[in-house]
Image (cartoon, coloured by chain):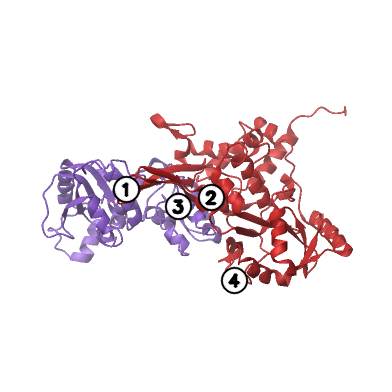
Amino acid sequence: MAKAKAKPKVGIFGFTGCAGCQLNILNLEDHIVDLIGLIDITTWVMAKAENSPGPWDIALVEGSIAKKSEIERIKKIRENSKILITIGSCATHGGLPAMRNLRDTSAMKKTVYGDTTDHLDIMDKIMPVSHYVQVDAALPGCPMDKNEFVRAVKALAVGKTPQIPNFAVCYECRIRENACLLKEGKFCMGPVTQAGCDALCPSNGAVCEGCRGPVAQVNWGAEYKILQELGATPEEIKRRFLKYCPSTADMEEFQELVF
Amino acid sequence: MQTYTIRKDEIPKLVEALKEEYEVFGPMPKRTSYVFAPVTDPTKMNLDYDSTIMSPKKYYLPSSQTLMEVSLKNATIEDTVKDILDQKPKILFGVHSCDINGINFLNRVFDGKYDDPYFQAYKEITTVIGLNCLEPCKYGFCRAVNKNFVLDGYDLFLTEISDTHYYVHVGSPRGDRILTIAHEFFKEAKEEDGAAFTAALHKKHENLPVALHIDNIHETLDLAWDDAIWDELGEKCMNCGSCALVCPTCYCFDVQDEVDLSISKAERVRKWDTCLFYDFALVAGNHNFREDPPARLKYRFYHKFRGAIHDQGEIACTGCGRCIDACPAGISIKDVLFRLQEYWAASPTPQGGL
């Protein structure tokens, strides 16, 4: 065999989120040794004592951008990385922290911190990483799917773009032979949510919460109508649509909806 | 042709006896529905099932299937046809006429228009025990598309002739094999059994609805090309693909190469794909033949009821009704066909003459 090429240098970074996606990488017990054989993780504050300041071939970024200081940090990581990939719904779509966008930030600050809030470096809107820098690929999900992560790393190691399913969760749900939860009257987000999780929630009887974000060419209007006919109020529908993906409110199709 | 009867309450024992030589699959309960699954407990198999979520297509064209294994180290490629042929032979127990017709349709594709060794290998190892439907199922409309009976494609075929017995037709030497290894369960049919079989068919014809006539479907679709129905459906459809996945005749797949973590082995895998997905008609240069989602839904109808007649000699629909059950948006292929039928009927016809 030809002499092995140098392994790609990888940095793993956390921004605003629960750090569950990074934890999911650590939890890849069956694959972690093989993974280390493919990539050289030079920076990972969560798991390593000594960390390189860069540059990196691949940056894996978890978490949303919630603070002004995080904007500078993400820009610096971008400048020092050849490829930048977001992992998890926070980094990809804003995620759960960004539910804050739908509320009055100053009132929330006051509730939590009282009158002394000057020290807080909080922006009014929490945004996904792609709002500030170019993102080359995204592994959405809350948390990101471990198997999808492994597939992505394999693809990157051989110089390919990671393939992310470009269809709805229903594909995986039907293949796992689940009866449709919407047909059972449950408020499932499967038809408007990007696949890749192997329909984990609906296969266990729980509705899809939409954590992987909207599928390509999403038909919000049709899902809206179905949920409404099942008895959901417009406010409930909006909360469901934006739960993991407040950034989708900017989508043209979304803005056509009347809430 | 020699025909037989079998006692219904002996079916579990028959399945148990067949398990020695075969892996037996049949309609098993899953939550609120049924699925074709290994018959682990034959008393749980329910031959009175209405329909299953997925058709037995999955036993001929699995949703994900390794076609070849590549060793980068040894520079070898091996296809997996032999692995299929090495599997324990399968019996699909209790397959309704619509689904046997579905398998027959796949046969026209993979052992007719195309020469697919994987499909053919699955066919080689699979024995089909069919089951006549004497009552309509919730969503089906098989009789409207002439798929409420089978001419071939089964090895044994059961028809309920009383509360206690099935009438058994033998369709092939593979069916004969079952009679040989489990002969104690089958009795030669008597004259009164034959009469009961005829009575059962009468009952079936009384029960199965046939309000829909699609003889002119291909030309109707030509007439309806610009009809408003396609926009209406396009608005409702979320292109989730459920209809195509549960369809016994949809046969499209994608082929992907997957490398393992050691980067020393790779597999070529085929996975079900559907024309409702964005990537389906996406080609080099980022051109997409059916960029708009509603165009993809329309395409599916036109392929099923028009294109397939040219390609496979018959429509690609067995009237099983699974897509109606599966569609989260409530789109009903049956309602669409009714609308098209009205469209045809409303087309001006000269008065008088023949």
Marks 2 and 4 belong to one chain: yes
| Circle nearer the N terminus (2, 4) | 4
Rounded to the nearest angstrom, the CA distance separating label 3 from label 2 is 10 Å
Q: Mark 1 points at which residue?
A: B264
Q: Tell whether label 4 touches label 2 (CB within 8 Å).
A: no
Question: Which is nearer the N-term, disc 4 or disc 1?
Answer: 4
Do dots 3 and 1 share one subunit? no
Image x and y of residue B62, in percent = 52, 51
- Seen in the image, is A76 located left or right of residue B317? left
The hue of chain B in the figure is red
The chain displayed purple equals A
Eye-nearest disc, 4 or 1? 1
- For badge 2, the amino acid type reads Ser
The chain carrying label 4 is B
- The answer for how far apart the CA atoms under marks 4 and 1 are is 41 Å
Q: What's under tag 3, amino acid-wise?
A: Val
Disc 2 target residue: B242
Question: Could you tell me how far apart the alpha carbons at marks 1 and 2 are, in whole angstroms?
Answer: 36 Å
Q: Report x, y in % for residue A5.
A: 20, 42
- According to the picture, the residue beneath numbered tag 3 turns out to be A169
Q: Position of residue B67 (x, y in %)?
A: 47, 46
Residue marked by disc 4: B41
Q: Is residue B55 above or below residue B111?
A: below
Q: Which of marks 1 and 2 is nearer the N terminus?
A: 2
Residue at left 77%, top 70%? B164
Residue B201, numbered label: none
**Percent coordinates x, y for residue A35 in the rendering:** 26, 54
